[in-house]
Image (tube, rainbow, N blue to C red):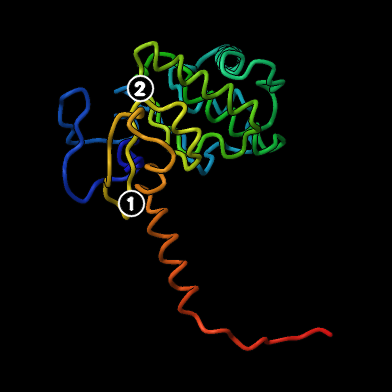
Amino acid sequence: LMHMVAGTLVPDSGQIGVHGDIEDNYSVSRAQQLGIRCVFQELSLCPNLSVAENTRINHASLRGFGWRRKAAELIAAKLDEIFPGHSISASDIVGDLSIGRRQMVEVARAFTVTQDRLDLVILDEPTSSLDAHTAGQLLAFVRRFVAGGKSCILISHVLGEVLRNADRIVVMRDGKVVVADAADAFDRDRLVTAMGGAEARQKIAAEIAAAKPAASPLRVR
């Protein structure tokens, strides 16, 4: 679904509507024009380019004399805003950065704005490679971003992260929405149950109880 919203996949059926209008020729460029960005779990940065050069890829308006300086200033300001004390330079080659720092750059790049609007950012497991402190910085920024009238879809399997930061929670299983409700209607147990956790635990327990002791393939005396 996130790929369809981002414009990287075309749906087999149904419609995509943005701001109340049906989009017939939806694409990545159209999504960006409409203010939609996406940070995929599989990072998309070019490892042979600098942080600033990777930022330029998302912004066609950064061209002509001095575009590198403008791109560097743009990404540096956003990194400072989201991750104070990050120590990442806009001139760093992405391939030389740790996975965690690459994820920080990818996230910061998604929130940079030049000529296109920015209304919705989809974050797919954005804290998977971040330490607790850096993850906290990002989630605090997301809350400020949303408080400013924007929207963010946070895809995460970290239950505490979801419960602490979401306004509304949607649980999907096997490609279908199984529950959608205000975040304050959930606690950890309800969320685990909606995700199939209770059912899975019961199934595993039943399988263990029904299993016969197997012969040991190897014994060490």
Q: Secondary structure at mark 2?
A: strand
Identity of the amino acid at label 1? Arg
Q: Position of residue 15 (x, y in %)?
A: 17, 39
In the image, 171 versus 106, the foreground residue is 171
Identity of the amino acid at label 2? Ser
Is 49 situated above or below 193?
A: above
Q: Quadrant of residue 27?
A: top left
Numbered mark located on residue 129 in the image: none
Q: Image point 47% across, 21% down: which residue?
A: 142
Q: Position of residue 36 (x, y in %)?
A: 35, 26
Q: Secondary structure at mark 1?
A: strand
Q: Position of residue 113 (x, y in %)?
A: 44, 16
Bin the neighbour count of mark 2 within 10 Å (Cα to Cα): few under 14, some 14-19, many 20 and up: some
Instruction: Say if mark 2 contacts mark 1, CB within 8 Å.
Output: no
Q: Quadrant of residue 25?
A: top left
Q: Position of residue 79 (x, y in %)?
A: 59, 18
For label 2, the residue is 151
**Spatial distance from mark 2 to mark 1, Cα to Cα?**
23 Å
In the rendered structure, the answer to whether residue 213 lies left or right of residue 145 reads right
In front of the other: label 2 or label 1? 1
In the image, 109 versus 210, the foreground residue is 210
Is 192 situated above or below 78?
A: below
For label 1, the residue is 173
Bin the neighbour count of mark 1 within 10 Å (Cα to Cα): few under 14, some 14-19, many 20 and up: few
